[in-house]
Image: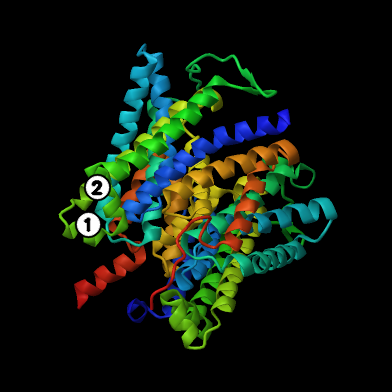
């Protein structure tokens, strides 16, 4: 039982990070139909910028805030300088652009920072506490709490504020949003900024547990994409569910089956789920128009 | 429309042969032959992937998996089972096409990004198995590959492989170009435009998609075998996600749907990192920047964009 709980908890912690990456994917996909393979780089930027500022003597909260700002700024730049100029290109061409962007961002990070692995101090100590026999790091609670706060905040923001409703309208139907006077281009930029900020927050929260380096983005983008597809692309709730489920599958596969094959087992489960439900857990059933 | 304006296939193939022959005359050192051989080999895999992506319109983000199977077949067969290396090329093809048939049947029912994640999963699994089954594959460090011999002569020089891979590339292009205008090629292009319209016209959509997947797997497998023999060493990275992405980038950057485009894309993506090593630590920055620029300014890919430009200029 203690073991089961332990795997559950570590699965949900990692899953929260996947969920945040998948959420970033979903926000950008909904706003602009772009599958953004640079999403993992935002996580890397969040961790690396905080580490660098902290080393320069900036206190942790200020460093973290600055890192989130830089994540959002990179999101804006990605949209304005790379995605917007290629508007109207085919989806696969846009994917290649985001892959180019992720190579570029990784390259810049490698020059500005370094190629080493870095750690952040845990926000409230490294002493694990006991919960029904499972030992839990306080930082895990930060990750869970942070992810939950973001999900709730986003939900409220999209539902309650004018700007949030404008972003949601842009995602639902770009032309109709234009017609009611919403500046859809700004809303898209805002979506990219939001995705960048969310990615950076995920990076800051998880770095005390998993370490960070300039190259952590690729695998996270891959996992986040898998989580978003598992939930059904374009669905924020699906992205969160997909992320948590992916984290849990990996944790249980690593714990009970084989740690070297945990990623592989996760992908096999995803394959079977998609074959059973071809549009993800709660994706829209699509009908092809002729 | 573009097909009409594109030069016909014998002209294309003659030009390709001419390029391969002329380059061989001007190359000053073995290094150039080596890079060019790598371009030809990558181009073979890209041409195959283009049949799946460009003709049939199906994405694969795990195609390097088949490259890995081709490569490890010629590495493992002779080393662990004492099999003839030539036979192993064939075994690799059988394994790749067999696996493509087995995996393709269920996953090709998925569409768009869902197919992308399914193929990505396949490639990821293949690379994972190659990295973990250390007994057979040597694990993440890779394994040595016994060189291929012809009439008692071991093929190790870059010049020899330049000609071998060049010949293979011409053959691969000839098959792909012929396929484009064949009944199967037309069926594939039809289902790319609209699956429902294609099905209504009596095309067996599922079967044709599967064929495109199998053909693409065979191309990748041959490229993988050639790569393993040429390098004399192979690691699981050959089957990895980044390699799969690189193959997709070759097809898209060169121009999706265009066989010549796949060769141009392979040329760009293989030679670029070699050229950019002069920037030392800025290599990745420059690579990412150039990929973005090319896709923004030639959004259809280099070859189709260039064709349109020329056609507009001269008509």
Residue A56 visible to an observer of this rendering: yes
> Is A22 situated above or below B218?
above
Disc 1 element:
helix
Q: Chain of mark 1?
A: A
Residue B177 or residue A221, whichever sits in front:
A221
Would you say A7 lies left or right of A200 here?
A: right
Q: Nearer the viewer, residue B314 or A202?
A: A202
* Alpha carbon distance from label 2 to label 1: 10 Å
Q: Residue B22: where, in percent of width, then height?
A: 44, 64
Q: Position of residue A163 (x, y in %)?
A: 23, 43
Q: Is residue A196 above or below residue B9?
A: above
From the image, which quarter does the N terminus of chain B lie in?
Answer: bottom left
Q: Is residue A108 above or below residue B59?
A: above
Q: Residue B146 versus residue B293: which sits nearer the camera?
A: B293
Identify the subunit bearing mark 2: A
How packed is label 1: few (under 14 Cα within 10 Å), some, or many (20 or more)?
some
Identify the residue position indicated by label 1 in the image: A177
Residue at image location 60% in from the left, 62% down from the top: A275
Q: Dot 2: within a 10 Å radius of its alpha carbon, few (fewer than 14), some, or many (20 or more) residues? A: many
Which type of secondary structure does the marked residue at label 2 adopt?
helix
């Amino acid at each position: 039982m203690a073991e089961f709980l332990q795997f559950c908890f570590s699965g949900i912690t990692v899953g929260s990070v996947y969920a945040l990456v998948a959420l970033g994917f979903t926000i950008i996909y909904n706003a602009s139909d772009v599958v953004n393979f640079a999403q993992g780089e935002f996580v890397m930027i969040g961790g690396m910028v905080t580490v660098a500022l902290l080393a320069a003597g900036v206190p942790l909260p200020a460093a973290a805030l600055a890192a989130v700002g830089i994540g959002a700024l990179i999101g804006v730049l990605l949209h304005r300088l790379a995605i917007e100029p290629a508007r109207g290109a085919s989806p696969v061409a846009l994917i290649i652009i985001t892959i180019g962007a992720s190579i570029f961002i990784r390259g810049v990070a490698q020059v500005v920072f370094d190629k080493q692995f870095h750690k952040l101090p845990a926000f409230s100590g490294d002493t694990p506490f006991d919960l029904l026999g499972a030992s839990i790091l306080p930082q895990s609670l930060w990750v869970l709490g942070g992810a939950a706060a973001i999900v709730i905040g986003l939900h409220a923001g999209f539902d309650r504020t004018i700007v949030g409703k404008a972003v949601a309208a842009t995602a639902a139907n770009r032309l109709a949003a234009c017609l009611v006077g919403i500046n859809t281009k700004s809303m898209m930029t805002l979506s990219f900024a939001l995705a960048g900020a969310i990615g950076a927050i995920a990076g800051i929260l998880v770095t005390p547990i998993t370490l960070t380096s300039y190259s952590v983005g690729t695998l996270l983008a891959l996992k986040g994409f898998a989580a978003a597809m598992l939930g059904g692309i374009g669905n924020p709730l699906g992205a969160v569910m997909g992320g948590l489920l992916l984290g849990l599958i990996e944790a249980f596969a690593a714990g009970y089956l084989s740690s070297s094959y945990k990623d592989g087992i996760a992908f096999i489960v995803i394959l079977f789920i998609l074959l059973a439900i071809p549009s993800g857990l709660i994706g829209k059933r699509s009908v092809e128009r002729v | 429309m573009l097909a009409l304006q594109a030069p016909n296939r014998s002209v294309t193939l003659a030009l390709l042969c001419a390029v391969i022959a002329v380059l061989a005359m001007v190359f000053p050192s073995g290094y150039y032959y080596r890079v060019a051989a790598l371009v030809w080999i990558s181009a073979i895999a890209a041409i195959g992937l283009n049949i799946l992506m460009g003709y049939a319109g199906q994405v694969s983000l795990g195609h390097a998996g088949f490259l890995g199977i081709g490569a490890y077949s010629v590495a493992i067969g002779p080393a662990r089972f004492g099999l003839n290396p030539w036979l192993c090329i064939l075994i690799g093809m059988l394994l790749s096409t067999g696996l493509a048939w087995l995996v393709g049947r269920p996953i090709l029912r998925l569409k768009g990004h869902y197919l992308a994640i399914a193929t990505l999963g396949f490639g990821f699994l293949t690379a994972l198995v190659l990295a973990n089954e250390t007994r057979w594959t040597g694990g993440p460090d890779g394994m040595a590959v016994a060189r291929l011999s012809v009439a008692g002569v071991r093929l190790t020089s870059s010049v020899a492989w330049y000609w071998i891979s060049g010949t293979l590339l011409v053959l691969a292009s000839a098959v792909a170009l012929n396929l484009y205008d064949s009944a199967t090629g037309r069926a594939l292009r039809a289902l790319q435009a609209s699956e429902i319209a294609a099905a209504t016209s009596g095309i067996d959509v599922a079967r044709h998609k599967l064929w495109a997947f199998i053909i693409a797997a065979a191309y990748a497998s041959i490229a993988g075998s050639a790569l393993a023999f040429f390098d004399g060493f192979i690691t699981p990275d050959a089957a990895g996600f980044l390699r799969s992405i690189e193959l997709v980038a070759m097809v898209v950057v060169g121009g999706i749907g265009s066989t010549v485009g796949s060769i141009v894309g392979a040329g760009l993506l293989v030679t670029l990192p070699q050229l950019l090593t002069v920037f030392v630590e800025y290599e990745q920055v420059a690579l990412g920047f150039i990929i973005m620029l090319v896709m923004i300014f030639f959004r259809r890919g280099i070859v189709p964009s260039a064709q349109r430009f020329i056609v507009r200029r001269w008509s």
